[in-house]
């Protein structure tokens, strides 16, 4: 029988196989071939608070997922949250993993890894399937173990002193670099022919050398696939570390504070890195008129090119000539302009969100593979190009500095090579664009894989994806819930299936070539998502994938890996009344905040929010914490006092009185200034406060609500200030998640007449103290309830402490709205509300959340509400009619 050469380190260079005359010709796989050892990638994640327990948990769990009988791990990849730094020595990481594996009879041959601000890894769920979980900013460890038959793997570390002097780096030849990078060469002679795959992780201090170092690696190993990341930390209080261990040198602790670690892999392995730049184009396409190196001085609209040839063509007919001349005149007005002058003009044509994104970071994309002879006339569409698997049309860079005199812009030195004629576009970084880009990137990956299969090439079988986003993605960009399957890893599962190992970490930078499948220049990205798909080069089986349902897998099939005790997926915890149980955010670093008047419950061990409301609460604490750092409570207090001393600001308007008056002639409608909703996203293309204010005034609104929260709803206290200015005579409710007195003082100074307290997020004391502080500032108080049980929290309030109740259709566990609207109506009709009204006869009662149809307005009026707060509904269909003549009970 034919058999694959066993024990050979290099599948491709193994001795030729002789076929017997009656056997099928190569490359058909013989029926009775000895089973090949599969390639295996498995990962595990633990969020245990103790580093040693987390390491033990991930090692045990990952080992249990490997094929039965595995005695050696070719490569282990470890990512450790730097949060542990404050309580444990990070030097225990490598010895702990190596020793535990050894105790189970498994040798770790090579290991690389780093600390990180967040980790990504597999967690076995109750059904024995894998879920990929992203844990940012909390203690967690992710471990990936691999078995790579017929692959030579060598881990290395290069210190800063081993790297040549970067000042002269440009002058080094390929030979010089090969000498410096000797450690990256596989030891075995056999592999010389093979393209190498080099995975590198740079320490924090190495960042300044990275561009030059990678240029050297490109020069020395032009055909190698190179990719990697820069180690990160949760906060600046901890130190970035990198790990590298080789069984050949078992005495090494494997931990380094500086330099770069890596692993060279050669043999039966294919590595496909893909970069998502996290940016989408805005505005038209330009051409560089004047620029060189990394500087662009002037640009011109791309469309201007070609008008002279239009005139040439049009000479035959008079009318066409006139049209062409007119076009030429128009084009002449589009003369080359300094980049900043064009930015200033272009930005005005963008919608609000785009303007805000652009002001945050000026991103410029320069055309890639620029060739003057071929690119003129073809406007390249970035995401279309990605979706066809052709890669990026533009290399996006953030502008490093701008010349205020000549209007030029300069990108980071060495990161681009500008030439006149090159196309250029402006980009913005937003979550929608980043999602679209990821989808296009993976569509392109799938397309190429299918094309290769149709061409009869060996079908690539993915065994793993290393998911390596930068720190500004994850929760910050996509709003992912920490401890859940995030968007970045979720898209991998969507395209590769849940049986392909999916692990990685959040980084301070990533690097790879922008061209999928081509070993071109390796570029460093400060903000990007790197996805690295790995599989065998041959048609070798992949452990755990669909294609490998053989007898080899039975050991693990019958004994699924244990569910990670630290990360079970469960519904949000609730108390005996069905209310969400909320904990205070755990402070991982920096000082803890204590506010004497607010009594918070104490956090448990688990630092993963269990509901959207808990997440919202933690984010709000962080937001206020930052504000307080810039401007302490004592300052805000005295500012507020001074503000109220001014006779213009001494009095607030009667929000409740205005509603009550309006409700005498019908249901009062309270329009809400609201930018976005967590369920819908942005509600308007342009959020023009003055225009909305005019509409609301014309509609006859008696009172208004202003959404001031930025975490969930996209608003801010500045929005309140602008509404105050636009509507000086209309009473305003400041809608925010109020958890500290600090916010109340700020909202008063921003122009609030009333504040909203979320009962689900407050204890009875919170409500009492916040209401009292509000009252001391002349503010009215509306309490938002989304369950009847929350009335218990109001039982002991004296009459007059609160002024309004708003019954909400929102479910705080996931921020969804009850589409039937019955949740709020149930609260409105409850005996508990009736009892409360008896004690507080002056209360006005409102309905909010998803109010959008006339029929529902009739229903709530019928049920006895005085008014409705309408946010999202205003931007869709509902016509605002304040004082509509709907009869109420
Ligand atoms: O508006 C806020 O900032 C806010 C903060 C904390 C809790 C609730 C908050 N808003 C209330 C809402 O949920 C909705 O914006 C309001 O009910 C309007 O809903 P809709 O008509 O569905 O837009």
Image: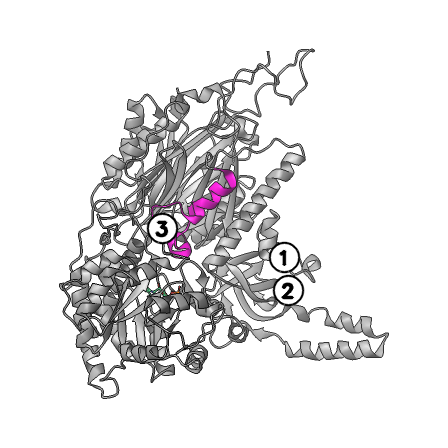
Does 558 lie within the magenta span? no
Mark toward the start of the polypeptide (1 vs 2): 1
Does 492 lie within the magenta span? yes
| Above or below 284: residue 12 | above
On the question of residue 164 being in view, the answer is no
**Residue at the spot 64% in from the left edge and 21% down from the top edge:** 28
Question: How far apart are the two marked residues, 1 and 2, measured between alpha carbons?
Answer: 9 Å
Query: Picture coordinates of residue 285 (x, y %)?
Result: 61, 66
Query: Outermost residue, right direction?
Result: 316
Describe residue 305's horizontal placement relative to residue 84 as left or right: right
**Residue at the spot 41% in from the left edge and 24% down from the top edge:** 557
- Identify the residue under disc 3: 481
Which of the two discs, 3 and 1, sits closer to the camera? 3
Q: Which residues are magenta?
A: 468-497
Query: Picture coordinates of residue 444 (x, y %)?
Result: 58, 46
- Identify the residue under disc 2: 421
Could you tell me if the residues under marks 1 and 2 are in contact, i.e. CB atoms within 8 Å? yes
Q: Nearer the viewer, residue 45 or 702?
A: 702
Describe residue 285's horizontal placement relative to residue 774 as left or right: right
Q: Nearer the viewer, residue 744 or 324?
A: 744
Q: Residues within 10 Å of mark 3 (few under 14, many from 20)?
A: many
| Residue 871 picture quarter | bottom left
Q: Mark number for residue 370?
A: 1
| Above or below 325: residue 520 | above
Mark toward the start of the polypeptide (3 vs 1): 1
Question: How far apart are the two marked residues, 3 and 1, measured between alpha carbons?
Answer: 41 Å
Which of the two discs, 3 and 2, sits closer to the camera? 3
Looking at the rendering, in which quadrant would you find the C terminus?
Answer: bottom left
């Amino acid at each position: 029988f034919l058999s694959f050469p066993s024990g050979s380190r290099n599948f491709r260079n193994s001795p030729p196989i002789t076929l017997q005359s009656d056997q099928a010709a190569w490359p058909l796989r013989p029926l009775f071939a000895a089973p090949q050892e599969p390639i295996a990638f498995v990962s595990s994640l633990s969020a245990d608070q103790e580093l040693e327990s987390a390491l033990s948990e991930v090692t045990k769990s990952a080992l249990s997922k490997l094929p039965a009988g595995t005695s050696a791990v070719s490569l282990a990849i470890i990512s450790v949250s730097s949060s542990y730094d404050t309580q444990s020595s990070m030097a225990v990481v490598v010895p702990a993993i190596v020793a535990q594996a050894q105790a189970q009879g498994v040798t770790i041959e090579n290991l690389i890894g780093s600390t990180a601000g967040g980790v990504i890894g597999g967690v076995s769920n109750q059904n024995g399937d894998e879920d990929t979980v992203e844990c940012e900013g909390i203690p967690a460890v992710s471990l990936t173990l691999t078995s790579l038959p017929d692959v030579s793997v060598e881990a290395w570390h290069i210190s800063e002193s081993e790297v040549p002097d970067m000042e002269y780096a440009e002058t080094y030849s390929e030979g010089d670099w090969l000498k410096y990078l000797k450690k990256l060469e596989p030891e075995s002679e056999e592999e010389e022919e093979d393209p190498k795959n080099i995975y590198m992780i740079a320490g924090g201090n190495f960042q300044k050398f990275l561009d030059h170092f990678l240029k050297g690696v490109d020069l020395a190993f032009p055909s190698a696939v190179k990719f990697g990341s820069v180690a990160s930390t949760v906060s600046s209080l901890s130190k970035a570390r990198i790990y590298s261990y080789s069984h050949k040198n078992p005495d090494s602790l494997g931990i380094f504070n500086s330099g770069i670690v890596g692993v060279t892999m050669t043999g039966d392995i294919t590595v496909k890195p893909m970069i998502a730049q996290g940016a989408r184009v805005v505005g038209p396409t330009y051409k560089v008129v004047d620029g060189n190196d990394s500087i662009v001085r002037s640009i011109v609209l791309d469309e201007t090119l070609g008008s002279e040839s239009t005139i040439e063509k049009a000479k035959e007919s008079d009318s066409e000539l006139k049209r062409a001349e007119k076009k030429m005149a128009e084009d002449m007005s589009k003369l080359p302009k300094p980049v900043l002058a064009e930015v200033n003009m272009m930005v005005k044509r963008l919608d609000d969100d785009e303007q805000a994104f652009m002001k945050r970071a000026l991103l410029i994309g320069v055309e890639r593979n620029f060739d003057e002879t071929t690119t003129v006339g073809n406007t390249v569409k970035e995401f279309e190009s990605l979706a066809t698997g052709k890669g990026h049309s533009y290399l996006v860079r953030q502008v490093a500095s701008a010349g205020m005199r000549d209007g030029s812009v300069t990108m980071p030195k060495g990161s681009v090579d500008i030439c006149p004629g090159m196309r250029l576009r402006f980009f913005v970084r937003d979550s929608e664009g980043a999602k679209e880009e990821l989808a296009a990137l993976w569509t392109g990956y799938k397309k190429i894989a299918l094309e290769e299969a149709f061409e009869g090439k060996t079908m690539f079988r993915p065994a793993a994806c290393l998911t390596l986003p930068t720190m500004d993605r994850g929760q910050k960009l996509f709003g992912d819930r920490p401890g859940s399957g995030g968007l970045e890893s979720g898209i991998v599962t969507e395209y590769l299936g849940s049986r392909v190992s999916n692990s990685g970490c959040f980084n301070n930078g990533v690097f790879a070539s922008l061209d999928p499948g081509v070993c071109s220049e390796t570029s460093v990205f400060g903000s990007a998502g790197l996805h690295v798909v790995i599989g065998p080069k041959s048609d070798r089986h992949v452990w755990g994938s669909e294609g490998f349902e053989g007898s080899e897998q039975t050991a693990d099939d019958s004994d699924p890996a244990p569910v990670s005790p630290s990360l079970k997926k469960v519904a949000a915890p609730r108390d005996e009344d069905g209310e969400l149980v909320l904990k205070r955010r755990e402070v991982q670093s920096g000082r803890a905040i204590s506010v004497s008047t607010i009594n918070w419950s104490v956090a448990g061990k688990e630092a993963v929010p269990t509901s959207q409301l808990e997440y919202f609460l933690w984010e709000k604490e962080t937001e206020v914490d930052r504000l307080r750092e810039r401007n302490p409570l004592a300052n805000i207090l005295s500012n507020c006092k001074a503000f109220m001393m001014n006779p213009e600001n001494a009095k607030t308007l009667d929000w409740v009185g205005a509603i009550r008056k309006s409700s005498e002639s019908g249901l009062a409608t309270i329009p809400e200034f609201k930018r976005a909703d967590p369920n819908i996203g942005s509600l308007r293309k342009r959020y023009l406060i003055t225009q909305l204010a005019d509409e609301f005034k014309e509609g006859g609104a008696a009172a208004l609500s202003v959404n001031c929260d930025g975490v969930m709803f996209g608003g801010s206290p500045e929005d309140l200030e602008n509404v105050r200015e636009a509507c000086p005579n209309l009473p305003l409710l400041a809608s925010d998640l109020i958890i500290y007195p600090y916010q109340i003082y700020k909202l008063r100074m921003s122009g609030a007449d009333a504040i909203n307290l979320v009962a689900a997020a407050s204890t009875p004391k919170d409500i009492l103290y916040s209401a009292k502080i509000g009252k001391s500032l002349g503010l009215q108080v509306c309490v938002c309830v989304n369950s009847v049980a929350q009335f218990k929290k109001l039982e002991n309030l004296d009459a007059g402490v609160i002024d309004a109740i708003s019954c909400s259709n929102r479910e705080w566990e996931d921020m969804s709205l009850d589409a039937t609207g019955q949740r709020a109506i149930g609260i409105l009709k409850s005996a508990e509300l009736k009892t409360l009204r008896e004690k507080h006869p002056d209360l006005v009662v409102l309905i909010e959340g998803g109010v959008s149809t006339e029929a529902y307005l009739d229903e709530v009026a019928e049920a006895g509400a005085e008014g409705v707060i309408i946010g999202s509904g205003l931007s869709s269909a509902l016509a605002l009619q304040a004082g509509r003549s709907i009869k109420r009970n």
